[in-house]
Image (tube, rainbow, N blue to C red):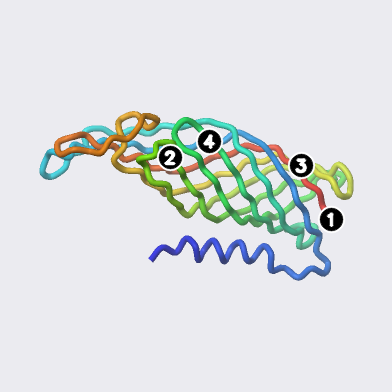
Amino acid sequence: MNKTPLVLAAVITSVFSIPTMAADWFVGAGVGAQQNGYDKVVTDTGKDPKEVTSSSSLTHDNEFYMVRGGVYLDDSSRLYGTYSYNADDSTTQQSFIASYDYLVPLGSGRLNWFIGASAGSNHVSPESENMSSGNNFVWGGQTGFIFNITDNLSTEIGYRYLDQDYSISNAPDEIDEPVATPKAGSEVTTLSATDSQQVYLSLDYRF
């Protein structure tokens, strides 16, 4: 049974089930650069048993956009949910994740260092119509710095790493070419998404 929807529901629900008293809510948006890692395996389907003829790792770099909202539980912790979008020549990826951060004040208190964990779901849509889209569970962590411009407005620079496990089969050797239906004796490529790394800048408003 696929546990991804259950895990995602649990982490997202935790963000929005915090008591409203003594909590500061915030919303924000950001942009950044994302690097997606892939493993590519080419298999000769005409041999018995099937034989792997080559394997390699590759990366795709592209921009991404995000919106988010959450709550500061106190001066040293926060919970929030994030939706992010990025696309390149091969796939479009949409992530829905919940995160927890621990904050450490630096200097005058306007600057905070944070470190935390994230978990959620990533929806992958290949550009080729002959490849099916799907969801996979992602998890990881983030760190960075928050600068409080005013009592309500802050900016943030951060880095996030997400581990993921998604495979696309019956692809040709080049991942951005149209997919042909594999024939007996043909070489079939399996492309697996392994991880994503994000560097971002955001602006948040705190209520």
Disc 3 packing (10 Å; few <14; some 14–19; many ≥20): some
Q: Amino acid at mark 1?
A: Phe
Nearer the N terminus, badge 2 or badge 4? 4
Q: Nearer the viewer, mark 2 or mark 3?
A: 2
Disc 1 secondary structure class: loop
* Mark 1 crowd level (few <14, some 14–19, many ≥20, 10 Å Cα): few
Which of the pair 113/22 is nearer the observer? 22
Residue under label 2: 126
Chain-order first, disc 3 or disc 4: 4
Amino acid at circle 4? Ala
Label 2 to label 1: alpha-carbon separation: 39 Å
Query: Contact, CB < 8 Å: mark 1 with mark 4?
Result: no
Label 1 sits on residue: 207
At horizontal 86% and vertical 49% (from top left) the residue drawn is 152
Q: Mark 4 highlights which residue? A: 87
Residue receiving disc 3:
203
Q: For residue 190, what is the image quadrant?
A: top left
Rounded to the nearest angstrom, the CA distance separating label 1 from label 4 is 32 Å
> Which is more foreground, mark 2 or mark 1?
2
* Front: mark 1 or 4: 4
Q: Residue at x 67, y 62 (%)?
A: 15
Number of numbered callouts drawn: 4
Q: Residue at x 51, y 43 (%)?
A: 93
Locate residue 105 relative to residue 100 in the image: left or right: right
User: CA separation, marks 2 and 4?
Assistant: 10 Å
Q: Is residue 39 left or right of residue 83?
A: left
What percent of the width, then of the height, locates residue 33?
Answer: 60, 33
Q: Alpha-carbon distance for marks 2 and 3?
A: 30 Å
Type of the residue with mark 2: Pro
Q: Residue at x 37, y 42 (%)?
A: 131
